[in-house]
Image: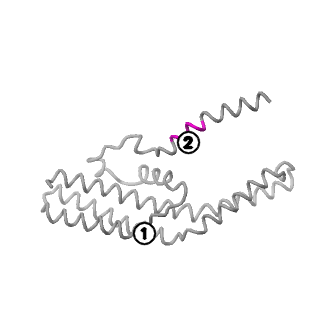
Amino acid sequence: MDKAGLLKAIANTGYNVGFGAKKHFATFDLVEKVPGWIGFISSAVGIFALVWEPLSAKVPSACLAVLGLCNVYIAAYRSKEYDEVGRKLTQIYNQLRDLYYEVQGGSDIEQSRARLTELESDFYAVSISKQILFSDWFTHYKFFAQQERAWINEQRQFTWKDMVPLSLRMALVVLAVALPAGAYLLWRN
């Protein structure tokens, strides 16, 4: 492998590791914060239901019960592990960045290739494959809005398609079609 190929390989691995680190932090954030928000919303709706009759109807009550079930789903995730792995992956990410600049500066290609292989093994060894629902959407924000990634962008020119998850784009299209259709059906009745 030549220098240009190694730089591209390091940047690709850097993207995977950096995105993986942010994905673990996204899961950590969601597991830590969502139950509190669910509790706050449930309490607020419960209080307002005392003074505003429509909130004590079956539909709002059912929605609150579903939100409560979400807490059961979230409780299966051990947030501390995701935080620890996110920190380890951030260290690997920083080592990859340093390796990238060393190769640019003329370091030995074979030694650098061996170091890349070692860092990739470390990445695969510590990553947790099970991530929480919607962590991918949050990860895109965390990686593309918060992460310093100019060195990766030298090799991979990110476009808006990289920065906005496909599932989010599809959900927005479905929503753009469903909302007017639903409004029309309500208007007709």
Which color scheme is applied? one colour
The amino acid at mark 1 is: Val
Q: Which residues are magenta?
A: 169-175
Question: Is 59 drawn above or below residue 47 in the view shown?
Answer: above
Q: Give the residue pinned by disc 1.
A: 85
Counting from the top left corner in percent of width and height, residue 60 is at 78, 51
Q: Nearer the viewer, mark 1 or mark 2?
A: 2
Counting from the top left corner in percent of width and height, residue 176 is at 59, 34
Can you say which quadrant of the picture contains the N terminus? bottom left
Which quadrant of the view contains residue 102? bottom left
> Which of pointers 1 and 2 lies earlier in the amino acid sequence?
1
Q: What's the residue at 54%, 54% (across, down)?
A: 134
Can you say which quadrant of the picture contains the C terminus? top right
Question: Is 161 drawn above or below residue 67 in the view shown?
Answer: above
The kind of secondary structure element at disc 1 is: helix
Counting from the top left corner in percent of width and height, residue 181 is at 67, 31
Density class for disc 2 (Cα within 10 Å; few <14, some 14-19, many ≥20) is few
Q: CA distance from mark 1 to mark 2?
A: 30 Å
Q: Give the residue pinned by disc 2.
A: 171
Which quadrant of the view contains residue 89? bottom left
Q: What's the residue at 17%, 58% (across, down)?
A: 103
The kind of secondary structure element at disc 2 is: helix
